[in-house]
Image (cartoon, rainbow, N blue to C red):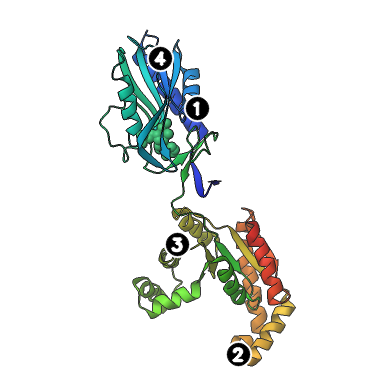
Amino acid sequence: MIKLHDKYFKPFISAKEIDDVIQRLAIEIAEDVGDEIPVFVGILNGSFMVVSDFVKKYPKPCEVTFIKLASYEGVKSTEDIQRLIGLTQDLTGRTVVILEDIIDTGNTLAEVHRIFENEKVKSLKIATLFYKPEAYKKDYKLHYVGIEIPNKFIVGFGLDYSGLGRNLPEIYQIKETQHMTNLVLFGPPGAGKGTQADFLKEKYNLVHISTGDVFRYNIKNETALGMLAKSYMDKGELVPDQVTIDMLNAEVEKNAGAKGFIFDGFPRTNAQAESLDKLMDSKDSQIDAMIALEVDDEILVERLLSRGKTSGRVDDADESIIRNRIAEYYDKTAILKDFYSAQNKYFGVDGVGSIEEITVRLSSVIDEL
Ligand code: IMP
Ligand code: MG
């Protein structure tokens, strides 16, 4: 992923794919042109890379020239096309092929046709590397189209966003949802996860999704997913991952404008971690980090026993039950630690100290992401 000015873009079309397409266009056009010496007319600025690569692949003699038009402001095409440099040579009787980087609304193309209206060229053909059929509003024939793409803003390979991105050798597409910071928060029982999650969600404007809470909410409110989950639980079966993912998806969608999410209690397995990656990917986003609070077993036991004295939670009163819960936590999370470490996304944070000290440590991890 890359950031240009205020916007984020994700990889979309590789340099190799672009190269293959330009090769194909060059052959196709050379065959059609036959023995004529064509004049290729690039439309500046965007087309400089296509033209350069195209003519290197063109297998026969040809001429190259440019006209310079400007229509785009930011990420929107405008009707108002400025003619910055017009035709500088007589093209009477010539076979002309316009080389465009991209055809979007077709406004620029309309201007090109106006420019050629009074030129007595032998033929005028239009070739474009990229074409957005959903955006095209004109009737001019496009003789050669490299790749049809959806109506989303792209940058790279000559195309810019307010001046930036032209130099990129591959194409990036704008991200639908802008950047989110998504965390998976882990910690053994007694590590202070809840306290820290509350703090992080305030400080970074994140939405805390506790899987336990989401389940309880859906079951209590008898949502379709809640009822489905309950039907498995009533039979003593595990709720299938897809049901949980669907619930999490609903939570993510409820908070569409969020700056990010803290996932708590999910994932627990590799398969779940992969599903969560897919879910974030479908939102044009990603899990940025698994943050695990690390606290020594003896300290956890001590903390939980003293909590048990005041909270009355039975599972906090018995030392062997506590030790079991801690051991189970390490059993289950070891795999996930490997999963996220492999992507350089695992961050262990020392969970011993005052609440403030720990929040400072967590913040420094998040600030670095
Ligand atoms: P049209 O006039 O709307 O067809 O747009 C043509 C011109 O707008 C192109 O030559 C580009 O300079 C620019 N353009 C169109 N779509 C994009 C895009 O997705 N990214 C960057 N520039 C674009
Ligand atoms: Mg252009």
In this rendering, position of residue 101 left or right of residue 319: left
For ligand 2, the image quadrant comes to top left
Which residue is farthest left? 139
The residue positioned 33% from the left and 22% from the top of the image is: 115
The residue positioned 60% from the left and 59% from the top of the image is: 289
Which of the 4 quarters of the picture holds residue 68? top left
- Circle number at residue 311: 2
**Identity of the amino acid at label 2?**
Ser
The residue positioned 42% from the left and 68% from the top of the image is: 247
Q: Is residue 260 above or below residue 7?
A: below
Could you tell which of marks 3 and 2 lies nearer the N-terminus?
A: 3
Spatial CA span between label 3 and label 4: 50 Å
Q: Are marks 1 and 4 in contact (CB under 8 Å)?
A: no
Depth order, front residue of 340/365: 365
Spatial CA span between label 2 and label 1: 68 Å
Depth order, front residue of 245/209: 209
* CB at disc 2 and ligand 1 closer than 8 Å: no
Spatial CA span between label 1 and label 4: 17 Å
Spatial CA span between label 3 and label 2: 37 Å
Could you tell which of marks 2 and 1 lies nearer the N-terminus?
A: 1
Kindly state the secondary structure of the residue where label 1 is placed.
helix
Could you tell which of marks 1 and 4 lies nearer the N-terminus?
A: 4
- Circle number at residue 39: 4
| Count of numbered marks | 4
